[in-house]
Amino acid sequence: MRGFLRAVSDQVKLALAIRSLLPPRPADMHARAEAREARFRNLLRYADENSPFYRKQFQGIDLKTCAITDLPTLSKAKMMANLDDVFTDRALRRDDLERFMNNAANVGTYFEGNYAVCHTSGSQGQPAIIVLDKSAILTMFAAQFARGQPVSRRFLPHLRRLFNPARFSIITQKPGFYPSSTFFNYFPERARRFTKLQRLSVFDPPDVLVEKLNTFRPNIITGYTSALETITREMQAGRLKPNSDLEQITNISEPLPKAIAEHVQQAFGIHVTNVYSMAECMALTCGCQATHGSHLNDELAMLEVVDANNRPVPNGTPGSKVLLTNLYNLAQPIIRYEIDDIVTISPKPCECGSLLPLVESVDGRSKDQFWVNINGQIRELPYYIFLLVIHNETNLAEHQFLQTGVNQFVLRAVAVPGKTLSVDRLRDLVQQSLISERLVGIVHFDVEIVDQILPEESGKVRRAKNVFGPPPVAASDPQPALASEI
C-alpha cells in the first residue's frame, strides 16, 4: 500500500511540475516575473546561509534588494578550487564524488541516495563536477516535457503519454557521467510511464544505427549534430526507412548550423528543434518549434549576454560570453557563472508565438573561434564562412577546420563510404566563400583527405578547432569585428 501511495504521490508531483511550466500566456507574465524574483531571492538567501563560499562572496551585499549585476561573477576554475565550500550540503566532498564517478557501475545511481552527479566535458578547459538534487532533476524533466513540443496550454494532451508512451531514441555516447547523458541517466522513475527509451551511441557503425532505428521506429530522435547528419545520409541512401511515427528531431550539445538543420529537415520532412544547455543548467532552454533557436526558461535561469568586460550587450548582438544563474538547483548554487559561449538573444518576439526569450544563435566557444590578421587589425573569422560552401559537397561524411597559424587553416575531410573526395573541388568550394567575403589573399588553407576524424573525449567532433591559440588582443581591448563586417 505504501508503495502504491508513493507512486501516486510521485505522479502528482510530476503532473504539478509539468502544469506549472506549460507555455505562458500574456496574462501570466506579471506572475511569472514575481515568481522569478522570488526564486532569485531564495537562491541568494539559501546560498548565503548554507554555502561558506557564497557567504564570503556576498559580504557587504544586501541580498534582499541587490541587482544581479551587484553580485560577483564565478569562473569554473574558482568554483572547482572551492567546490567543497560551494556545496550547500556540508557532507558533500569533491574527493568522494570523484571516487563515485570513477566507478562506471554508479551511472544512473544517486550519490548517497540523494544527488545526481555529472562532470562537464572539459571543452572549455578544466572539467567541472556538477551536483543536482532530486527536485532539480524533476524540474529538468518537467520543463522539457511541458515545453519541448508544439506550444499548447492544454494539459490533458500531455497526459496521453501515460497510455501511449513515446518511443524516444537518444544518439549520444554510451551512458556515462557526461552532461548530455545525465538527463537520461536519472530519468525519473515516475516519468518512465510516459516514455520508452532507446540508447544509441555515436560510436555505433551506421548500419547498426539503421537496424536499431528501423526496428524501434521512434517518435522522437535526439542526438548530436554529427549523429543527425549520419542518419540523414542513411535516410537519403534508402537504408533508414521512412517512419510515419516520427514526430520530432532534437539537436543537443553541438552547434546546429542552419545549413545542416535544413538538410536534416528536408530528408525527414519534419522540423529540427535545437536545445541549448549545459551541465550547469540542463533546463536552460527548450527547442523552438518554428525556428532553429531555443527558448530560454527564464523563470528557471537567468542568462546575461555580456562582452569581455561583463557589460551587457543589446539583444540582437552577439556577446563574448554569458553569465549563467541557475534558479532551481540549490545543492550547488551556480550564480553569475562565466561560460565562453557566443550567444545572441533575438530582439523580436518569436514567430512561434512563445512569450519566452529566444536564443537566436549559439556560435561556439570563444577559445575555438577563428581569427585573422588584416593589415595589423585582428578580426574574428566565423566558422560559417567555410561551412555554407562545404555542405554543397554531398560526398563529404565528416569534416574539421583547424586554425594552425596566423591566417593559416587546414580542412580535414572524410568521404562517405564508397565515395571519393577531390582536393581540388573542396579547395574551389572554400575559395568561393573566401571570394564572397573578400578574404582572398588573406586566408590561406590546405586540404587533407583523411580516413576518419576522431571525437574528443566528450564523444563529439569539434568541427572548428583552434590549435594555434587566441589572437594577440588584451582583455581590455575592444572586441574584434566579425569578418562579415570587413
Image (tube, rainbow, N blue to C red):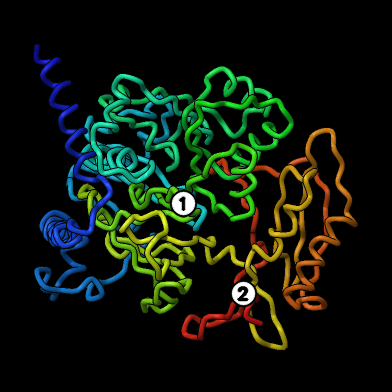
Residue plotted at (34% across, 68% down): 304
> Three-letter amino acid code at disc 2?
Glu
> Three-letter amino acid code at disc 1?
Ala
Q: Nearer the viewer, residue 199 or 308?
A: 199
Whole-angstrom CA distance, mark 1 to mark 2, is 29 Å
Count residues near mark 1 (Cα–Cα under 10 Å), then give few for <14, some for 14-19, many for 20+.
some
Picture quadrant where residue 48 is located: bottom left
Picture quadrant where residue 303 is located: bottom left
Is residue 132 in view?
Answer: no
Q: Which SS class for mark 2?
A: strand
Residue 40 in the image: state x and y as whole percent: 18, 60
Name the quarter where the N terminus is drawn: top left
- Residue at far top of view: 1
Residue 138 in the image: state x and y as whole percent: 25, 37
Residue plotted at (17% across, 46% down): 90
Residue plotted at (11% across, 73% down): 65
Q: Nearer the viewer, residue 342 or 75?
A: 342
In screen coordinates, is 109 left or right of 445? Answer: left
Residue 366 shows which numbered tag? none
> Which one is in front in this view, the residue at disc 1 or the one at disc 2?
1
In screen coordinates, is 158 left or right of 205? Answer: left
Q: Where is 396 relative to 345, above or below?
A: above
Residue plotted at (38% across, 41% down): 149
Q: Nearer the viewer, residue 149 or 41?
A: 149
Residue 380 shows which numbered tag? 2
Q: Would you name the residue on which mark 1 appears?
A: 290
Count residues near mark 2 (Cα–Cα under 10 Å), then give few for <14, some for 14-19, many for 20+.
some
Q: Which SS class for mark 1?
A: loop
Is residue 87 in view?
Answer: yes
Q: Reading the chain from its start, which is encountered first: label 1 or label 2? A: 1
